[in-house]
Image: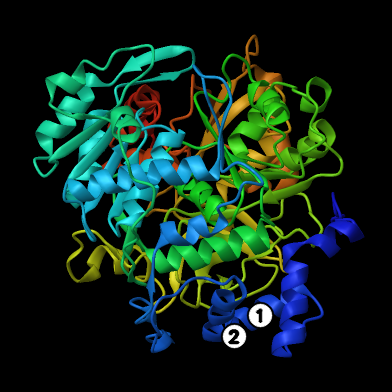
Amino acid sequence: MVKAIWTPSSKFIEEANITKFISWLDETKSLHFSNYEELWQWSCDNIESFWEIIVEYFDIDLKDSYKNVMSSQAMPGVRWFEGAKVNYCSQLFKNRTKEHPALICKTEKSDIKEVSWDELYLKVAALSKFMKERGIKKGDCVVAYMGNISETVVAFLACASLGAIWSSCSPDFGSDSVIERFKQIKPKMLFAVNSYNYGGKAYDKTDAIKEIISQIPEIKDTIILESPSEPASIIDEISSFSFKDIIENSNAFEIEYEFVEFNEPLWVLYSSGTTGIPKAITHSQGGIIIEHIKYLKLHSNIKPGSRFFWFSTTGWMMWNFIMGSLLSGSTAILYDGSPVFPNINFLWEFAEKVKMETFGTSAAYLMACKKAELIPSKENDLSNLKSIGSTGSPLPIAGFEWCYSAIKKDLWLNSVSGGTDICSVFTGGLPTLPVYPGEIQCRSLGAKVESLDDNGVAHIDTVGEMVISEAMPSMPIYFWNDKNNERYKESYFETYPAKWRHGDWVEITKRGGAIISGRSDSTLNRGGIRIGTAEIYSALAKLPQIKDSLIVGLERDNGNYFMPLFVVLNEEVELDLELKTKIKKIIMMQFSPRHSPDDIYVIDEVPYTLSGKKMETPVKNLFLGKDIQKVINRDAMRNPDAFNFFIDFKKEVVDKLNYN
């Protein structure tokens, strides 16, 4: 029996938002729940009542009456709260206060600064007025090529105030990758930075901006945020506007909100695009409002003024999730730059300086800190830190153990799994539940997550295909330019009609937790025994010699199977016979001899998408002989040169294997 690695104190439980919510349900609705699992089950069995209660409990501002909570319960195509009107920006500024700042910001080049709620409001009012004067209205698309800075928040909120549709890419995206995304939605206005800093280096984006404008003729206006250290000559070159001048020269003091129908678009996010044109995933204003408030308040335990941080760029859905923390009344902490510059301890130093309460990051970053043998608690005062958030990939057991030994013993480790698809969380944390190593605490309220076997039957304590069996408000309303919802249906509903297939392997435990073991399309299925790649990575995380790794399994029609393991080694480590033996032994002991790799190869780096996901499926598809042009899009990669090794490996190793 696995023992809990952390248990919340009685005071922590008593003060939790979810505790107050359960008490309110008891007192106001005569709904009695003895534990969270009962509440979760009720929320999934009574979807309409649950979401209507969320709107009531959190005083979500719905203008006009709605004729129903759901148009139907059959996925896809559910419409929510039809007839009601909402405005994301208006809902967010209900949290306006003088008690705490709205934003705390830092970049590699700038000192820490605070932005008050009043300052944020006035800047949004100024920019909203300018955009309206330039003809931006409900339904128009506005895009940003900007970093995780306060000005991007201002631009997004101004866009949302008008009922316009937002979309953003990080300035580390190449121009081709940006064009591929933005061109689909034909934006009328572009916000951009003329330069940005990363890893101690400055990157000029002048040529990229010119290329974007030349390739997307629908862009009528461009607003440039000038770097303080580099004059923005581009403003004169392309006849654009200065972001700074717009704000400073405005006489606007009030925001004029445009309330839109609940199911109208709020923003467009994008799939990774590593294997084709990125899907332009569109979410509704109302769906995102109620989902983010639900999750961030009840599951993340956000309270007024909670200091909430998640390391992200504007090209990852976690940036939009940070906006959700503002929607929930937090102080959002923004950082723009490298997480390991000038050293790997930097973000922990930052956490101390800004008195961070929630530190959100990727599992990869936490594991990198572990591999570097970092002990943040020795270097920094983390007394304000209450929670660590982890996402992006499954956090191995060794990562859980490191957090409690190196950061803090009394720490709520909030591991979550969701996706760009819903811009939220399917399985995540809860402040009132224990934390078990390697396990996500619970399924989110209103998210009917199940593990299905090959026959489509749900099971507990068995690894299976992860599906969501009831609609959620933040599921995409559509993909842009998707005729008859063909790509939408193909992406989620092709395998199990009327059930959303997410593409993960998941085990739902008897206590209601979830163990994600990797993507189902990159599963290792050898000799009929199937495990997720995340389990291999979890085993390898225990070896200090290995910095990173990637594994694929190649099935052939004649029953042959080839499973190579690729490892990135730490400095001054060699892949000798002793280390190979250790690697194979730890995998065999933790899983089975069947999943010992056929051979192990040293690589310089694992290929990653721009959003930080290992590219297992593209590597596998390359090895299986699929067209390289359809396998990867280098512009959608964080480190495109890393794929060159695998192209050569296919020719030199895979193609010479005897499969006959």
Residue sitting at 31 percent across and 48 percent down?
128
Give whichever of 640, 584 is nearer the camera.
640
What colouring method underlies this structural image? rainbow
> Residue 386: x, y in percent?
77, 44
Picture quarter with the C terminus: top left
- Position of residue 328 relative to residue 48, above or below, is above
Closer to the camera in the image, 289 or 521: 289
In x, y percent, where is residue 464? 57, 65
Could you tell me if residue 322 is visible in this image? Answer: yes
Residue at image position (87%, 40%) is 409
Query: How far apart are the two marked residues, 2 and 1, measured between alpha carbons?
Result: 6 Å
**Label 2 crowd (10 A; few <14 / some 14-19 / many >=20):** some
Residue located farthest toward the top when viewing the structure as drawn: 572
Mark 1 residue type: Gln
Residue lying at 41% horizontally and 32% vertically, measured from the top left? 147
SS at mark 2? helix
- The correct choice, above or below, for 363 with respect to 568 in the image is below
- Residue type beneath disc 2: Asp
Left or right of 642 in this view: 429: right
The residue under label 1 is: 41
Which residue is denoted by mark 2 in the rendering? 45
Pick the quarter of the image with the N terminus: bottom right
* Image quadrant assignment for residue 439: bottom right
| Left or right of 433, for residue 547 | left
Q: Are circles 2 and 1 on residues that touch, CB within 8 Å?
A: yes
On screen, residue 483 versus residue 440, left or right, reads left
Q: Residue furthest right?
A: 10
Q: Quadrant of residue 140?
A: bottom left
Q: Nearer the viewer, residue 623 or 326?
A: 326
